[in-house]
Amino acid sequence: MAIESRTDVVFKGGMKFEGKSGRAGAAVALDFAREGEAMDGFSPMELVLASLAGCSGQVAVGLLQRMGQEVKDLTVRARGTKKEIHPAVFKAIELEFEFRGGQLDAASVEKALDLSEDRYCPVWAMLKTAAPIRKAFRLLPG
């Protein structure tokens, strides 16, 4: 049986939209502006990167906790390089996981990230068919 996801996006004027979660009712601002111009929200492609970073980070934290590891802080930095012609899709993506504090060993982190990539993060599974995704991680003291 298929599982459905849903979101509504409402036009707010200019190039602004508001996206609303179909489950939580939470909202996120979307906007578009030329390079160097002010924006009042995420661009759609930034949201793609945020979705990848959030999904892979949530999976990694959950797996590490199940492995008995202590995660105190995690920042996931996602960077995408886009094609210069339209459609300006990502041609490469980089994920950098920065763990700070807690009790973590590198082997467990590597295993959790591999499982996130290969099995549990649907955003990663979908995007890696369109663009190569390189991952790296760092363990920093708290």
Image: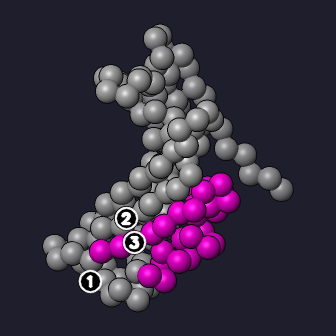
Q: Which residue is mark 3?
A: 136
Q: Position of residue 61 (x, y in %)?
A: 41, 70
* Label pair 3/2, CB-CB below 8 angstroms: yes
Given the image, on which type of amino acid does mark 3 rest? Ala
Residue 103 numbered mark, or none: 1
Q: How many marks?
A: 3
Q: Position of residue 55 (x, y in %)?
A: 50, 58
* Mark 2, secondary structure of its residue: strand
Given the image, on which type of amino acid does mark 2 rest? Glu
Residue 39 forms part of the magenta stretch: no
At horizontal 31% and vertical 23% (from top left) the residue drawn is 38
In-front residue for pair 59/97: 97
Magenta-highlighted residues: 110-138
Q: Would you say 40 lies left or right of 117 here?
A: left
Q: Extreme left residue here? A: 142
Q: Residues within 10 Å of mark 3 (few under 14, many from 20)?
A: few
* Label pair 2/1, CB-CB below 8 angstroms: no
Q: Nearer the viewer, mark 2 or mark 1?
A: 2
Q: Which residue is mark 2?
A: 96
Q: Extreme top residue here? A: 13
Q: Give the mark nearest the N terminus, 1 or 3.
A: 1
Q: Where the C terminus falls, by quadrant?
A: bottom left
